[in-house]
Amino acid sequence: MATVIFVFYITITLTALVSLILFGSRPSKSLSWLLVITALPFAGVLLYVFFGINRRKIKFFKLKKIDEMREYALLHSEAAPPLSIQSGSEQQKKIASLIANSTGTFPDTGNKIIILDDGRKTMEAIFAALERAEKFIHIQFYIIEEGELMERLYRLFAEKIREGVEIRVIYDAIGSFFLGRKHIKRFREIGVKVYAAMPLRFGSILFTINYRNHRKIIVIDGKTGFTGGVNISDKYIKPSENSGIWDDMHLCLRGPVTESLHRVFIKDYYFASNGENLWQPEYFPENKEEGHTTAQIVSGGPDSDYASIMYQYATLINHAEKYICIANPYFIPSITILENLKMAALSGVEVKLLVPKKSDRSVVRYGMFSYFEELLSAGVMIFEHPVKFLHSKMIIIDDEISSVGSGNFDNRSFDQNFELNTLIFDTAIAVTLREDFEQDCREADKLVLSEFVKRPLIHKLLEGIARIFSPLL
């Protein structure tokens, strides 16, 4: 019996190793998985099958739903208009072209964008807009948690359903794991259509558990949109025990860009609901110009042939001439992002990185710290905010272009999660976001290289371990 088990173990281990060698996405990630597979008998192979297989390349392991989502997106993609950044710089046009060619979404002019820079402000704006809904409310969140905000949402939905408003909700099965069936049932009983994105079901869990939908989208009557980093969670209005109150950046969108945002929701909803097709004229009213801002939706995920979120960040970093401001709570960069930031700093571009001092995940904190010494050595300025848990995912360059959304600076957001950012070509908005960023930096602790290198040896060891596994986080 022991011989059979040993032969079985060798067979599946060799199969996993061959798969890793032939189809690994990046050397650093492949080496991390190689260590996991060889160091953890059986468990390492199982972890690789669940979380490590590059399903973009291995046809046998491709999730049928991912392929269907790709085909659906192509069928209902936007018609290719001429790029609408007529008065923008050449770098703006190049970035817009990159996003258009890698995601199929195009820049829209004539938008009004309102910055919502804290949780309470965001929630009040969202609920005020929901109360004005007349035809439909479409909502998509990674996290919907039991609490004060969820109950308020339930009461508002009940009122709107009585008024004849259609309400559809998508939540992520992992992010909202503790939502509970009883709450989902409550929403369905009042007439809300609620579905999980990539649900964890027997028979498909092997292929879905590593693909999470991290997007945050609200579209009301096809006219008003909200997107950014905020979830439906009381963490944004009440301090949590470990990380304090969560601080995040969100946007309210009005104008033509709302349609691009809505297209992403409709695609995700089609598959979450097993086929309810909302590609109907009543869900796409004409959006007249409401402002002067040009914006472009950047959607990325495993249903795309390109790592669009990483492409976006890398291109912004490469095109910066004066400064780069990055705020991110889970900064575990790919080698591309890491080297681009170092090159930017060494070439004289002012590079600032803002992260929270407290983290909701210890392994991520050590993983982040493992990159700080080389970034500081290259001239990157790093700030830790001691009070707020900064959850924003934001980058601003040269008072010209900014991006706010759900995409972190990590491999999961680049390759495995369904993410969504809003790329904004507007000087006034970039300046406002930079001023808000600078205020947070003034309140934060600036890391000094000469002091940082003196941190305890145990911290360096933990950082080293986290660095080895960082491509897997």
Image (cartoon, rainbow, N blue to C red):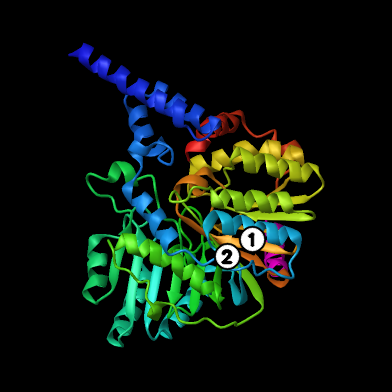
The residue at 67%/78% (across/down) is: 292
Dot 1: what SS?
Answer: helix
Residue carrying label 2: 106
Q: Is residue 436 magenta?
A: yes
Residue 409 spot, x, y in % from top left:
57, 48
Dot 2: what SS?
Answer: loop
Query: Is residue 282 rendered to the left or right of residue 423?
Result: left
Residue 196 spot, x, y in % from top left:
31, 59
Quadrant assignment, res 2: top left
Q: Measure the C-alpha gap from mark 2 to mark 1.
A: 7 Å
In front of the other: 443 or 45: 45
Which amino acid lies under the numbered mark 2 shown in the image of this protein? Phe
The residue at 50%/49% (across/down) is: 413
Quadrant assignment, res 117: bottom right
Vertical relation: 221 (above or below) 7: below
In front of the other: 352 or 361: 352
Q: Determine contact: label 2, label 1, CB under 8 Å.
A: yes
Vertical relation: 226 (above or below) 65: below
The mark that comes first in sequence, 2 or 1, is: 1
Q: Which residue lies furthest to the left in this view?
A: 1
Q: How crowded is mark 2: few (under 14 residues within 10 Å), some or many (20 or more)?
A: many
In front of the other: 15 or 180: 15
Residue 306 spot, x, y in % from top left:
52, 48
| Label at residue 210 | none
Query: What span is in magenta?
Result: 430-445
The residue at 26%/19% (across/down) is: 8
Q: How many marks?
A: 2
The residue at 41%/21% (across/down) is: 38
